[in-house]
Amino acid sequence: MSVDGDNKADFQLTWEALIERHRRTCADLQEATEYGAYGLAVLVLRETVGKTVMERSAKGPGFDFWIGDEEDSQLPFKGLARFEVSGILNGDDSAVQARVTQKKKQVSVSDIHGSPAYIAVVEFGRPLTRVESK
């Protein structure tokens, strides 16, 4: 999987073949894309930016997670950054960039926190993850 945006990297993804029981665990393809994007984005962020998820955000502030340094335990929110994740099942570069732009606008609602924000868009067709800071 290629990573682009503020940092560039390549990662090898491997998985076991799916069986019918696996396919039935998430028949909602949109939800599966969202959850898959969360998983990959968290791993990519950790490897490229050195940050990890500290807390799930409440609904409403325009981002998914609070992130920080793993050894940092200064909750609530001191020294943390915001992290918004989105998944695209299959899209070209313009679709990925359009989603990044949309998510940057969405995160702007919470700019009053004064903390940095990261946006990750995972596109599963290639696959590709774009990570940009705001």
Image (spheres, rainbow, N blue to C red):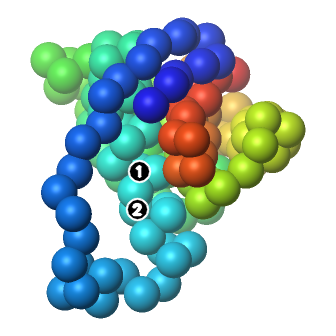
Q: Which residue is mark 1?
A: 38
Where's residue 38, x and y in %? 41, 50
Q: Quadrant of residue 21?
A: bottom left
Task: Judge left or right: residue 29 versus residue 106.
Answer: left
Total numbered labels placed on residues in the image: 2
Q: Mark 2: which amino acid?
A: Tyr
Task: Judge left or right: residue 104 versus residue 67.
Answer: right
Q: Secondary structure at mark 2?
A: helix
Residues tagged 2 and 1 counted as in contact (Cβ below 8 A): yes
Pick the front one: 133 or 120:
120
Where's residue 100, x and y in %? 73, 37
Looking at the figure, which quarter contains the C terminus? top right
Residue depicted at x 31% and y 18%: 47
Q: Which residue is mark 2?
A: 35
Q: Dot 1, how many residues are within 10 Å of its Cα: few (below 14), some (14-19), or many (20+)?
A: many
Residue depicted at x 55% and y 35%: 128
Above or below for 24 versus 97: below
Where's residue 61, x and y in %? 61, 52
Q: Dot 2, how many residues are within 10 Å of its Cα: few (below 14), some (14-19), or many (20+)?
A: some
